Amino acid sequence: MSTLLLENIDYLVTMDEKRRELRNYSLLIEDGVIVKIEKEIQPEKGWEVIDCKNKWVFPGLINTHHHFYQALTRCLGEVQGAELFPWLKTLYPIWARLTPDGVVASTKIALAELLKSGCTTASDHHYVFPRNQDPHLIDCQIETAKEMGVRFHPCRGSMSRGEDEGGLPPREVVQKEKDILDDSLRLINSFHDPAPYSMCQIVLAPCSPFSVTPELLKETAVLARQYGVRCHTHLAETKDEDDYCQKELGMRPLEFMEKMGWTGQDIWYAHGIHFREDELEVLARTKTGVAHCPVSNQKLSSGVARIPEMLQKGIPVGLAVDGSASNDGSNLLVEMKSALLMHKLYWGIDSLDSRQVLEIATRGGAMLLGRPDLGSLAPGQAGDLFTVDRMKVGYAGGQTDPVTALLTCGDSFQADMTIVGGKVLVQKGNLRRFDEEELSREGIKQSRAMLGKG
């Protein structure tokens, strides 16, 4: 049995059912699960003990939408002024050069960044499968996430409708529907673990209404529900998407997805910016979720999602960084600050507060992923958390409200320590088990190869 005790916690934000915030408490984790949160816990022989004096402790953050492979194509000058559709058209041919080595390197980079920002559970939407490469790219991600110790919800993405059929992607990254469904079933049978405290759960995730056929959407939802896994896709991200769906499909994106069987508490969409009032009612009634990606939405000028209204209506909402090529980073602490400030500016000063944003990034993400064992700190919950050192200069003068300070203060937006399942993966702001310079060096190498720069 492995036992980890965090003692003398200066401020503990539990996000439990009562949303308790506790001063000078201790927290005990046994075999990856929280067993006690008490004022004082006497350590016993053989326990690992961490003194959390001057540390603020929060539940591990949950990233509900990402594209890890895009870490290799950040900051490309030719797309810095492009909105989503032209952005994709420019990048698809570059992504068609993706290799298994590139997948491994980009996964390590993205997960390293996430861990350093307090993220303990990540979902990645991988839909690029070049024809000339090993088709088992998701397996590379799963093995890498296991190596790094992160809870992982890999989304088996897909594109089956190429440019020649009215879709957006080039033929080089389009797959046959049978191959997609066969591989989806293989991944479920090989890797999906539905048990509490699971480290890997498969999600089925056609890329978008403009890159797959209606038949694939329908069959994917049927397959997922047959095996009890969740479904995910992009939806209502841009006005171009609205126009495309009405022109090509004769209806708005959500109406189309509803007809395909894509609403319900086992479904969540990335973005959800351009939903109308009546469509929000559909999401609320069906408990269909939304992954909010504030930084990406700003950078691509896609719009501002109606997050405060979604929360009022009881729509499940999680937080996400989206792909590194539309964000250039994988930092959930930055994402929280961006969400807070963006909605205050756009919807009004009282539209969203710091604790609501933290809830989206913890309990909200757990709800989207169907993980009641995650998202809060309480006995019986997974031992996933991160700490912040309140004595860092960026928090000086901001000690009266640690939750607001987490979102709005700070000089690095990095966790001091990140723990997953009772295992310390980040310590003093650095990865504990990996050489960060080595990860960076390999990422640079794979990026240059993908960009054709040798």
Image: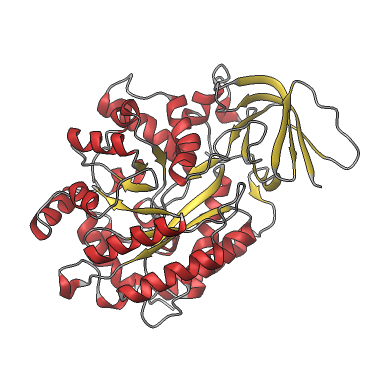
User: At 48% from the left edge and 58% from the top edge, which residue is drawn?
Assistant: 202
Residue 167 in the image: state x and y as whole percent: 19, 67
| Whether residue 408 is situated above or below residue 299 in the rendered picture | above
| Quadrant placement of the C terminus | bottom left
Identify the residue at the far front of this view. 226
Residue 322 in the image: state x and y as whole percent: 38, 51
> Could you tell me if residue 365 is visible in this image?
yes
| Whether residue 163 is situated above or below residue 266 in the rendered picture | below
Q: How many marks?
A: 0
Residue 39 in the image: state x and y as whole percent: 75, 20
Identify the residue at the far bottom of this view. 132
For the residue pair 2 and 301, the one nearer the viewer reads as 2
User: At 41% from the left edge and 47% from the top edge, which residue is drawn?
Assistant: 321
For the residue pair 58 and 139, the one nearer the viewer reads as 139
> Could you tell me if residue 443 is visible in this image?
no
Residue 112 in the image: state x and y as whole percent: 56, 54
User: At 62% from the left edge and 41% from the top edge, which residue is drawn?
Assistant: 384
| Whether residue 379 is situated above or below residue 274 in the rendered picture | above
User: At 38% from the left edge and 62% from the top edge, which residue is drawn?
Assistant: 223
